[in-house]
Image (cartoon, rainbow, N blue to C red):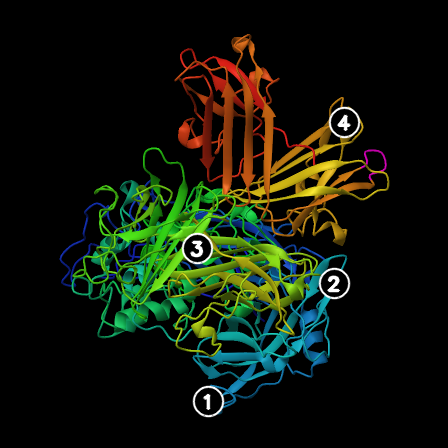
Amino acid sequence: MDFTQRWTHVLTAAATIGLLGSACGSGDDFSNPGPADAGAVADAGDGAVGVDASLPDATGIDAGPTDLGPAPATEVTVSGQAVKLGAYLAGSADVIEGASILTYGITPAKTAVTDATGQYALTLPANGQVLLFANKAGYFQTYAELSTTSQNISDQRIYLAETSWVTALAAYHSVDLNQPFACHGAPAGALNPDLQCIYAIVVGRLVDDGTPGGGTVRPVSGIAAADFALTYGGQNWYKKGPYFMNADGTPSNSAASVVTQNQGAYTGGLFAIFVEIPMVDGAGSRDLQVSVTHPAAGGQPERRFGPRGVKVFRPYGVSWATLSETGAPPPPPPSSVDFDTQIYPLFLPVNQGGFGCQGCHTNQGGAVPAAGMSLVGGPEAAYAELDPAKHPSRVNISSPDESYLLKRPLYEADGVQDHPIFAFASPQDPAYQLIRTWIAEGGVRNQIAYGVSYYREVRPLLAAPATEGGTGCYACHVSGRTENTAPGGFFMGGTAGQLLYAMTGRPATYVGGTNEKYRVNTAQPAQSLVLVKSLAGNPTPHPVKIFGDATDTRYQRLYQWIAAGATDDRASPDEVTGGAFVPQAGYELHGLGTMIRNPTTQETSVIVEFSGLKPNQAYPVHVHAASCADNVGGGHYKIDPTVADTVEANEIWASVTTNANGEATGTNLVAHLARGDARSLVIHDGTLAGNPKMACADLAPEADVLAEGQFLPLTAGAELDIYGSATLRRWIGGTEAVVSVGGAGLTPNTTYPVHVHAARCADGEGGGHYKLDPSVADALKDNEIWPTVSVGATGRGFGEAWVPHAARSTAWSIVIHDPVSKAKLSCADLRVSTMGYDQRKSARDLFNCGLFKPIAQGTTVRGAASLARHVDGKTTVRVEVSGLSPNTTYPAHVHDGRCAAVGGHYLIDPTAAPGAANEIWPTVSTNAQGVGLGTATVDHYAWPSAGSVVVHDPATNARLACADLFPGGDVTAEGAFIELTAGAGSGIAGTATLRRRSSMGTDVTVSLTGLSPNTTYPAHVHALPCAENEAGGHYFIDPAAPAGAANEIWPIVSSDANGVGSGKAYVSHVARPDAASIVVHDPVTKAKLVCVDLRWPTP
């Protein structure tokens, strides 16, 4: 009696039977074979023009380290134990002494006998497959199929099925293992009914993709017998069952798979199928395929497991099949096969998705390639060894099945191999079929351009659950994770742009045994971590091995996308241009300008954003016809160039009027598609005669522009606690809208309608929906932008939408609606914030702040708190309070939700335990006057649910005061200058302010007297208080970047004839809490003269 299992030294989540590999030390010559085991033979007699012995092509897709180094090992040692199968399923590991172990499928055969501890050891060929035959009285004969690589394999168990366990299982289900019966033809089976059959047995386990267990694979319950399919060559194969077992492997009459949970451990998911096999006729084994399709029901999606190849033997062989959830239907038969991206990867080492052919067919390290055929050096070099025009015996396009590339590595059912180790279990093997199709299609190196879509194919494979077509990465790298908590720092959630950046724009933080630092390696696709770490044959630890080998169509799609350059295929016919305004001499302002050309509607939009202007003042803004370097934009752009007069209707104006803070937004939409001579935007000074040019922005092509805003409640949501941020990105790919929200006002596990709207939040609560085509009045998803938000169990919500259209200037806001009543709950105005989006969490720092309100009776705490989310992914918190006990340390924490919600501590990772490492603690220490300062910085981009800061009593831990963190506010730190050592007696005095502005950056102003007349003084923001080493060094915007004006804040001071001076500085960065002081230096010696501590005023 026989039993077989695919025993690999790593768990595979999408197993297939055959692993293509050519035996090391092989004497086979694929071009002109001699007798079996005849040794190396010269390559002659087939019209070949010789072996291409040139060096690997340096420009090849996988050229480089893959083919370097010494030749790999030719033999490996496999060792382990023989264990009772039934006892193992029951939770025991009973070893078997005296079991005989033989090898099938290799030449010469090897043998071993287990010792008193059940141990065995065998020396086998590397890079291929072998069948281990185990036998002992009282057990069913057992076959274990093993894949070897170039590494030794230890702890390789072989399970022998006890006779008592198998017969009890058959008797329970009234299956006669002794009496032959007539075989079954179509449609029930695929055999000749005139033959006599007996039963073989398939025993296996159903496992999920790791999603429910957060990366831990678990057995699956509830799968019915009708969900199973058993086929041979596409035809049904006669069977009895499947029958399901209890979690301990004992028989059960359950109608569906059974799982038991005990102290967090899950067992079960076991099944048995009795399949017919001819008693004496034909081959002694058959290769079947098992798959499961569990239909959608009860609101749950369809689930798919397998397909899984399994080899069954006679007489009464017992074969094991682990059926893993794949989420994808069985792939169609291969067609239009590409050599470079589908065939060549099969020759690579097993740990790179191939089948180890290069282990023997290599000339690296001075090795003589087996059969005179070297398959290293990239697709071009490998194809030269397989070109049917030169090697028709290796690749026989007239009779594909006669090709040595297929025949020699094929398992011989009679046990006589003409190849030292086999690769294909049968002609039904996916790798065999893929190569055969390529040969039948002409065996050409066609270099097909597949055009794999990143947005529609690659991203869903990585970011979606298996039930929605994903590969299973979702369980560990998306669900409940962030950039800081995902394994290896590889967060696959967020926007499509963020995932692309995570793969292509930053190195991996953990590379394991691969020594590969790139998640996506376009020069050598097979080495990309996104592929190799999930491969069954790669020894690098990974919770779930998703890809069995390179024949997996999901692997192929990823490989093809990487080989083609790993690009973002999202595209739009619209054109986005833009740039930052550069002030002219004598002006200080900051601004961004954007132009969107929409050829479909023949319209042009202009958006400008300014700060640093005079308050409540009108400023003309126009599109100009020259670049800024050419007379500051030259003259106005004319819609009709033949009209010379300055007429607003013939030009594109986006004039603005500032608010009380000197900020302004201007837009215009004209029914004209601007020509290429619309080159710049210019703002003019409307306060002076002649409207002189103040600043100019070049409209650079392929601009990447981000508009952002924070949600504020609308009428229907006034009593709800909903807050968060929204972004709208315009770039060459179209428009991407992203919403991130939190708060107690959101219902967990609920989907909220969200849309881009065509008015500001204050104008009819956002007005109606924005339309891609304004002529279509109906609310159609395909004509609008809907970043629908899904709120998870923790109350945090995320939504994203992309359209192949660059939104016009009328995309003003994003509105969240009630999921039932559809009322407008919250709205975020969208204001352009930056150019050059870099796929980070945000293109600018986001700043929230609020004042403390007492909670406990008699509390005298006053002060404010702020929380800034920075573009580098960090979050900083600052707390400044008074009215506390002197010289005391007070606990302070960021909390979930607003003060009124009385939520718990905000958790960086909601799935992890609470504590300092998983929370944000701006602990406050007071001085002798009871004034306290607390700060915290964490390497985590806080979710919107980080809504408040609470200060606690140090003795009782009671809540003393709470500050809600609201968007839209400014916090100004200020102080008076004091003299330092070098400035003692200088008489320099004055004040300074540092204003952190809601999502707009940091303004610094300095006012001084007692300076030398008409002199420029260096001044900088410093990183320590004045009393600590005279303020220490300069404050750095990016602490990891070099010193210099671009990475610091310099409010340089210029004095007048009376020695009165002032200085200003602005950066589009919200200063962290360590922006503690400002120092003015001597203009000659650079000594520190005076310093001001930056403290918030007491409210």
Q: Secondary structure at mark 4?
A: loop
The picture places residue 213, in percent across and down from the top left corner, at 65, 59
Mark closer to the observer (3, 1): 3
Image spot of residue 297 (x, y percent): 63, 79
Is label 2 in a helix, a strand or a loop? strand
Residue picked out by circle 3: 497
The alpha-carbon separation of the residues under discs 1 and 2 comes to: 45 Å
Residue 1064 x/y as whole percent:
46, 30
The numbered mark at residue 914 is none
Q: Nearer the viewer, residue 533 or 12?
A: 533
Q: Residues within 10 Å of mark 2 (few under 14, many from 20)?
A: few
Residue at mark 1: 192
In primary-sequence order, the first of circles 3 and 1 is 1
According to the picture, the residue beneath numbered tag 2 turns out to be: 261
* Residue 777 seen: yes
Q: Which residue is mark 4?
A: 930
Magenta residues (range):
953-957
Q: Tag 3: residue type? A: Gly
Between marks 1 and 2 in the image, the one whose residue lies nearer the viewer = 2
- Asked whether 272 falls inside the magenta stretch, the response is no
Location of the N terminus by quadrant is bottom right
Cα distance in 3D space between marks 4 and 1:
95 Å
Q: Is residue 956 magenta?
A: yes
Three-letter residue code for mark 1: Asn
Residue nearer the viewer, 747 or 319: 747
Q: Earlier in the sequence, mark 2 or mark 4?
A: 2
Q: Real-space Cα distance between discs 3 and 1?
A: 57 Å
- In three-dimensional space, the C-alpha distance between marks 2 and 4, rounded to whole angstroms, equals 55 Å
Residue 304 as seen in the image, left or right of residue 95: left
Please state which amino acid type lies under the numbered disc 2: Gln
Nearest to the observer: residue 524 or residue 746: 746
